[in-house]
Amino acid sequence: MTGTGNVRGRTVGAGVFGALLFLPVFFLSSRIAAAGPGARYALPWALFAAGIGAAIVYTGRVSFFRRIFFSVSALAFLVHFKLGMLYKVFNVTCSKDAPFCHIAMAPYFTGYLYQQYLAFMSGGWKLWGPLTLGAAWLFVTLAIGRGWCSWACFYGGIDDGLRALPRRALLKPGAWAARFRDLPAALLVFLLLASFAYMLPVYCLWLCPFKLTGEFLDAERSTRALQYGLMGLALAALTLGPLLTKKRVFCSYLCPFAAWQAFWGRINPFRVTPAEACSGCGACARVCPMSAIKSGPGGRAEVLAYCNLCGECVEACPAGGLRYTLFGLELPGGGALAGFLTAQNFYVYSALTLGAVFSSLWAPAALKDVIGALAR
Amino acid sequence: MPALFAEGFLLGLSTGFYCLASCLPLLAPYMLAEGGGTWKPNLLIFLRFAGGRLAAYALFALLATLAGRAGRYALPGWAVPASLLACGLLMTALALLRTAGGGKALCALERGLSPALKRLPLAMGFATGINICPPFAAGFLRLVGLADLPKGFAYFGGFFVSTTLFLTPVLLGTPWLGRRANEIGRLTLLVAGLWFCLLGLKGLI
């Protein structure tokens, strides 16, 4: 009887959660899609997101279903946005304006500030795109903080999806993994300085794995070869890295935005926190795709600032020793809704809504592309 | 002479932002990697860097005078990329030694190499000093016209003082420099070192 009651309770909870998620996602996604492929293409995307949310609440498995959503979103990005850019590979125009990409934003921050200064001095500050982006970034950081890297980032979705494909890691991360864990922070500092010095988006010009299809290559032959080399290296880290190590190599070691968000993510109240039940078995550290868990005092798990709240460790811990918390609380309230109004559900709702609305910039359009290709 | 000092000072004041942008990628990673949580060691690093720049400016004052007298420009074209390459190699070596040592300097570094590497800011300052930027080139041409050594020193002295003012904000990070910042700084030094190696090689080839 209790089991049946639990199943019914979970089913109702999952249904309510899915419906609550569907409404804002469909409302906002259809408005975004209306400007592109058409509002009707937002419906399946919103239903998909709501289904993922319902599955998480029903099963309690955050990371498994999150990864499905995240990878599908990244795949849609590749289908619609990046394959479209392949046509421009041989475009000879050399446009080096900073793109409005979140990864470029962080290391080119000083450049944006300078652009704002120029816009302000020319009286055109209201037209300043980065100001809007800055506000959007602040909202995202307050809503999900470092969760951006595991729920919304299209680069991360590729890394995370590929990571799940092999059964076992062919390469085990050695001592170097911990020694170079701060490389994204170092890259961020250097790129901030270099971008400031050249007033160019240095990350996009030299490291972005997707600029192989863009217009950022230098006219000079040897410089262009070097750009190809570095971009190829980054592309290998993004694709081969996770396949060989089952870790998110690009996100953990080459993404400056990961370091940026690790720093500013402190202002967000959601955390993954080790509970008293932690036995120090190390299962969480082994599965953490970001190498963001280390053994702390007494062997207990210590979650580093690089944690992006993917939930992999929460699922892997045999003793249930890691939990999502909000302001350090699990929020196990009393009453009929005790199992529903948890920190985990609040976080999943926040992250999934934001991730689904953000990816409606390309996911409904990708759906239209696929339908169009099949219809031909 | 004071008029020429003021002229150089004003030129530096009006273009110091450019100096800040070109000097920070060299100075800031080193400061982050090797600086401390107190002002004194950081000030020493800063002064060494400034000393390197001053030496480069003095050299240019001399060269401008000679060039003015001889009617031609005397610094060989390989000097700037070669100095950038040397700085890049030193920065990379220091970063690798520190990182390989797990945050501590290797024994060899502590015993024999440390004094030389501690003068790295001097070399970096010199490398940025001889790296000709547009305002610097304007000053150089002014001195070629003057072709007078004391006047050249006065002019570049003023230029040095005012541009150095723009670099002082790098010291503001001092209270936040600790072990963790040093660890990140060493990796930044490594990335910056490799970058300057590439720039130097590209210039030489």
Image (cartoon, rainbow, N blue to C red):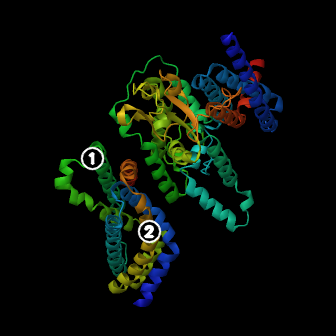
- Residue B119 lies, in percent from the top left, at 27, 62
- Residue holding disc 2: B167
**Disc 1: host chain:** B
In this picture, is A366 found above or below A137? above
Q: Amino acid at mark 1?
A: Leu
- Would you place residue A107 above or below residue A162 in this image? below
Please state if B48 lies on the left or on the right of B174 as rendered: left
* Whole-number angstrom distance, CA of label 2 to CA of label 1: 28 Å
Mark closest to the chain's N terminus, 2 or 1? 1
In depth, the one of A162 and A287 nearer the eye is A287
Residue occupying the point 44% across, 68% down: B167
Where residue B97 is drawn, which disc sits there?
1
Chain under label 2? B
Spot occupied by residue A144 in the image (x, y as percentages of width and height): 62, 40
* Amino acid under disc 2: Leu
Residue B74 in view: no
**Hey, which quadrant is residue B124 in on the image?**
bottom left
Q: Residue at left 32%, top 49%?
A: B95
Crowding at dot 1, Cα within 10 Å, few <14 / some 14-19 / many 20+, comes out as some
Can you say which quadrant of the picture contains the N terminus of chain A?
top right
Badges 2 and 1, same chain:
yes
Front in this rendered view, residue A282 or B116? A282
